[in-house]
Image (spheres, rainbow, N blue to C red):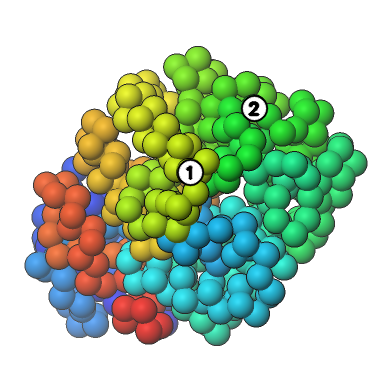
Amino acid sequence: MAVRALRCGTLFDGTGAAPIRDALVVVTDGRITSVGPAGSRADATGMETLDLSGRFVMPGLIDCHSHASIVPGQGDQLGQLCRGPVPQALAATRNLRRDLAAGTTTMRVMGEEHFVDVDVRDAIEAGVIAGPRLLVAGRGLAANNAHGRALASYDGVDDVRRGARENLRRGANHVKIFVTGGVSSPGPTPTASAYTREEIRAAVEEADRVGTYAAAHAHGGPGLQLAVREGVRTIEHGALATDEDIALMIERGVWLICTFGIFMHPTGIEQGDGHRPAIMDKVHRARRVVADNFPRHLASGVRFACGTDSMHGLMPFELQTLVRFGVPPADALLAATRWGAEACRIDDEVGTLQPGKRADLIALDGDPLKDMAALTRVSLVMKDGVIYDGAHGG
């Protein structure tokens, strides 16, 4: 039985409780067995102890929306998805190492071609490559003329059902459907729905039938409202959501997954597709609308978490943006830990540092409750009790 004690300078356990100074976390066979003030564990004497007494320790980050193989700064994201399976897998391996090294221990992947996400997830679980724990969607369900359409499209109720069932048969953890247009493509508007009510309902029903849920790419307006009314669990992005949209999400208990970096960070869409006026017009509009509306949305009571949308290693930017929009620093940390776990239905396993949970945690040089930039200084990453040395594996 492998037992290790971690002596923490400051412990933020993700439960909502106040941080603990001089805390001790005991890990046994990859699970947390006790958490509390260091003085409360007299029996810790003799254990292998890792001294993190000068650092801020918190749960590993949960990126609720990303794509393993894409790098937005390289441009043409759909073109990247349409590469062959070997280039896709190699890109994913590189990107996921970067995510893990930056403190992301769990990631929800929201669509890949060739079922690369399923294979990469299995390779990580087998210890073949290093990366966050993955929750995967398989192929994103997109209409033939819609945003997100890569190698395959799904049109009509029967086709949507077939696509959802194939993903689930191949091992998908959830169903992803592209309901509205997007910011990173020049085509459909980001608020109109590419799918009918019946098509969206089919995706939701197929997910529900096997005990999981559907997530909808939707930026706002009629498309977002249609997805919410038909029962999706999470709205991805929501950049153009109105007060009416947010009120409906609150009423139905639907999560908002914020993804700011891809259109706000200079190494995102701007770097990759800045030469395409039709895309940059959407980017500039999204920046204006989000800056005007999100301080109000995030204070409305809507449940929210966050993701990088393929901006690998940039979860700190997402949390810094939440704080800039008025979210208290402690709540920003919760959005990347416990709330992310709740949104993804994995809060029985991760998201907080409590006995029985997986030993997923990170140590920071600095206190993010005082300065979110401390999240860029990750000095230790532990996943399932295994310490990972930067981007080079465990």
Left or right placement of residue 47 versus residue 269 in this view? left
Instruction: Using a 10 Å C-alpha cutoff, classify the residue at mark 1 as few (fewer than 14 neighbours), some (14 to 19) or many (20 or more).
Output: few
Residue 273 screen position, x and y as percent: 47, 54
Q: Is residue 33 visible?
A: no
Residue 237 screen position, x and y as percent: 49, 39
Residue 337 screen position, x and y as percent: 37, 50
**Is label 1 in a helix, a strand or a loop?**
helix
The residue where tag 2 is placed is 192
Going 55% across and 84% down the picture, which residue do you hit? 128
Residue 37 screen position, x and y as percent: 16, 57
Q: Is residue 222 visible?
A: yes
The residue where tag 1 is placed is 277
In this rendering, the answer to whether 322 lies above or below 371 is above
Quadrant location of the C terminus in the rendered image: bottom left
In this rendering, the answer to whether 247 lies above or below 132 is above
Foreground label between 2 and 1: 1
In this rendering, the answer to whether 239 lies above or below 378 is above
Quadrant location of the N terminus in the rendered image: bottom left
Residue type, numbered disc 1: Pro
Residue type, numbered disc 2: Ala
In this rendering, the answer to whether 71 lies above or below 230 is below
Tag shown at residue 339: none
Going 36% across and 58% down the picture, which residue do you hit? 267
Left or right placement of residue 14 versus residue 170 in this view? left
Upstream in sequence: badge 2 or badge 1: 2
Left or right placement of residue 226 versus residue 352 in this view? right
Q: Nearer the viewer, residue 130 or 218?
A: 218
Where on the picture, by quarter, is residue 123? Answer: bottom right
Going 29% across and 65% down the picture, which residue do you hit? 362
Going 57% across and 45% down the picture, which residue do you hit? 185
The answer for how far apart the CA atoms under marks 2 and 1 are is 21 Å
List the single residue furthest toward the right. Answer: 158
